[in-house]
Amino acid sequence: MINGYDRPLYVLPFDHRSSYVKGLFHWQQPLNANQIAEVAASKYLIYEGFQKAVTDGVPRDRAAILVDEEFGANILRDASTRGYITCMSIEKSGSKEFEFEYGEDFARHLEEFNPTFGKVLVRYNPEGEAGLNKRQENRLRRLSEYLARTKRLFMFELLVPPEKAQLDRLGKAAYDRELRPKLMIETIRALQDAGVEPDVWKIEGLDQRQDCEKIVEVTRRDGRTKVACIILGRGSDEKNVLRWLRTAAGVPGFIGFAVGRTTWWDAMTAWRGKQISADAAIAQISTRFREWVDVFERAPTGDR
């Protein structure tokens, strides 16, 4: 059964694990108990920034957090009690091939936290290794069927990294501009045909409105009329993020965004380096998140 999600959705992702621990703390896994607690406490600051943004005007019924269980279990529980939209990552962090974070036990973890959305990050290039793509399809179909059966929503973050031959032929800029949008459409179609049915697709930033329109068209094909897309920030700078948001914001079918590192990385780095206080970091995160929301709130409403 294909459902979808057709209300505005503004997501603050901070489910980063491997890159977060290495980049912000300069630590290597495995962490000891004190380190785990310190990372979890830092993520709570990001969560407080999110809550301040809601207090300061971001519509509560459109605002969502995306966080991992490993460092964000208390955040997921607190957010649920406060009635926020919650998204929980399911994939193993830093793995090229999609695998479940908790292996065959993934369902029990979803049931314990009962997030609004189960979320996966998947790297899939249709011109890549066929065996890899097939293994991922099989796992993702199982997850899709489980989420539909248990009436949970499915959020799918699609990354289409270039194959070496594609990069050699085009270079990074031309790949992103000319080839990646076409490969994304091929990938979405292939995953749908394999029985993978997200309610919301997280889409890497696109520079052309017509590419956004084509992505929506394929995500909504064959009766998937309420399936929606959100644009993601790719950890890029503010200029790029604003361009991608503005490109997608007026396109029917793009209901919002998921912008993580560009929202909180600078604030958290300054706080970690004792350059600013926790309150200042919270305020910066809130301001940046509200900046993204304003882009969508100011866009022509239409059928988003």
Image (cartoon, rainbow, N blue to C red):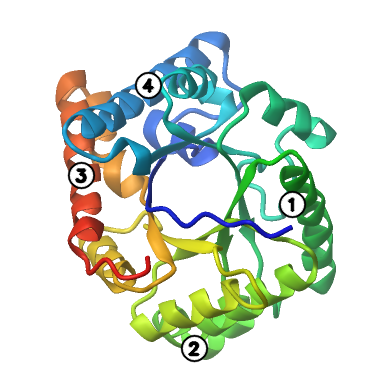
Foreground label between 2 and 1:
1
Q: Which mark is residue 44?
A: 4
Q: Secondary structure at mark 4?
A: helix
Taking depth in this image into account, of 169 and 207 the one nearest to the observer is 207
Of the numbered discs 4 and 3, the one sitting upstream in the chain is 4
Q: Are marks 2 and 3 in contact (CB under 8 Å)?
A: no
Q: Earlier in the sequence, mark 2 or mark 4?
A: 4
Using a 10 Å C-alpha cutoff, classify the residue at mark 1 as few (fewer than 14 neighbours), some (14 to 19) or many (20 or more). Answer: many
Q: Nearer the viewer, residue 271 or 155?
A: 155
Q: Residue at x 50, y 74 (%)?
A: 216
Label placed on residue 144: 1
| Residue receiving disc 3 | 290
Give the class, few, some or many, for how many residues have Cα within 10 Å of label 2's Cα (few <14, many ≥20).
Answer: some
**Helix or strand or loop: what does disc 2 sit on?**
helix
Between circles 4 and 3, the one closer to the viewer is 3
Amino acid on which disc 3 is placed: Arg
| Spatial separation of the CA atoms under disc 4 and disc 3 | 18 Å
Query: Mark 3 and 1 residues: CB-CB less than 8 Å, in contact?
Result: no
Q: Label 3: few (<14), some or many (≥20) within 10 Å?
A: many
Task: Give the mark nearer the N terminus: 4 vs 1.
Answer: 4
Q: Give the CA separation, mark 2 to mark 1.
A: 34 Å
Within the image, what quadrant is residue 195 found in?
Answer: bottom right
Q: Which residue is mark 2?
A: 170
How much space separates mark 4 and mark 1, taking CA atoms?
Answer: 30 Å
Observer-side mark, 2 or 3, equals 3
Which element carries disc 1, helix, strand or loop?
Answer: helix
Judged from the image, the secondary structure of the residue bearing numbered disc 3 is helix
- Which is nearer the eye, 42 or 18? 42
